[in-house]
Amino acid sequence: MKNSLTALLIGAAIIFLVAVSACIVRAPSILVDNNLSEFGVFPATAFLFNSGLVVAGALLMTYVVILLFVLIKFGVFNPGMAKALFTILLEAMVLVSVAMLASVFYSPLVCVMLTALFYVVGHVKGDFLYRAMTDSANDPATRAISGVAYYVLPNLERLNINETIAHSERMFSVGATELLLLIGLAAAFTAILLFVGGYLFSRRDL
């Protein structure tokens, strides 16, 4: 069972990477080909939102396929695993929006690197950036930059409930209210990043 699940997760990761790569590579060229920047921020933003919805659909289909596979193959439905996979999907959407924002200006390779950097910073900001911001031994510039990054960047660790699920939610329960809050958090950051991407593209001199 472990090997089968590992192979399934690898397949899901490949589907996700293909969808993200397609958005990174094609989004800027389609925006340019259709001269969307000439019509202002809203057409460009609408296109980015539509592209994000396509990726969200692909991720949601992957999520459903994984749950159905486990249910059919092993006769098991684990609510904890379903919730953990769902929050991974939410985090993936935030990362997709970052990649699409970066794709407005940078090449696909640079976009991938920036998205990976965003992922790392988003997961360590709660501890690393807070200490850098509050440590009096650091110079004022370091504390200021760390403070801006701490309050501007999303805390991706809030979307990580894997440890909680692994401990059978003994620390706290992840119910419908908590999931709705996480959905709202991910949706807000995704919308902001896509809107900023559309605005920046509309300001480009093509």
Image (tube, rainbow, N blue to C red):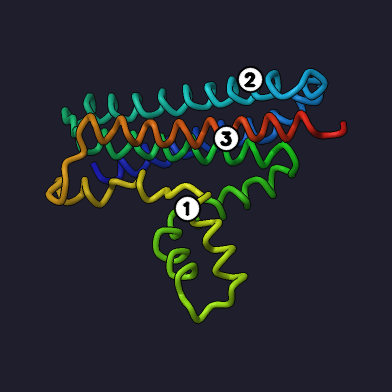
* Comes first in the chain, label 1 or label 2: 2
The picture places residue 129, in percent across and down from the top left corner, at 47, 64
Tell whether 91 sits left or right of 106: left
**Which is more toward the observer, 62 or 49?**
49
The picture places residue 16, in percent across and down from the top left corner, at 50, 35
Which quarter of the rendered picture does the N terminus lie within?
top left
Query: Is label 3 in contact with label 1 (beta carbons under 8 Å)?
Result: no
Q: Secondary structure at mark 1?
A: helix
Quadrant of the rendered image containing residue 9? top left
Distance CA(mark 2)–CA(mark 3): 18 Å
Amino acid type at circle 2 is Ala
Tell whether 137 sits left or right of 7: right
Categorize mark 3 by other alpha carbons within 10 Å: few (<14), some (14-19), many (20+).
many
Tell me the residue at 24%/31% (across/down).
Answer: 177
Distance CA(mark 1)–CA(mark 2): 26 Å
Amino acid type at circle 1 is Gly
Amino acid type at circle 3 is Val
Q: Which disc number belongs to residue 46?
A: 2
The picture places residue 8, in percent across and down from the top left corner, at 36, 37
Q: What residue is pinned by disc 3?
A: 20
Q: What residue is pinned by disc 1?
A: 122
Quadrant of the rendered image containing residue 50? top right
Quadrant of the rendered image containing residue 43? top right
Query: Is label 2 in contact with label 3 (beta carbons under 8 Å)?
Result: no
Q: Secondary structure at mark 3?
A: helix
The picture places residue 22, in percent across and down from the top left corner, at 63, 31
Query: Is label 1 in contact with label 2 (beta carbons under 8 Å)?
Result: no
Q: Secondary structure at mark 2?
A: helix
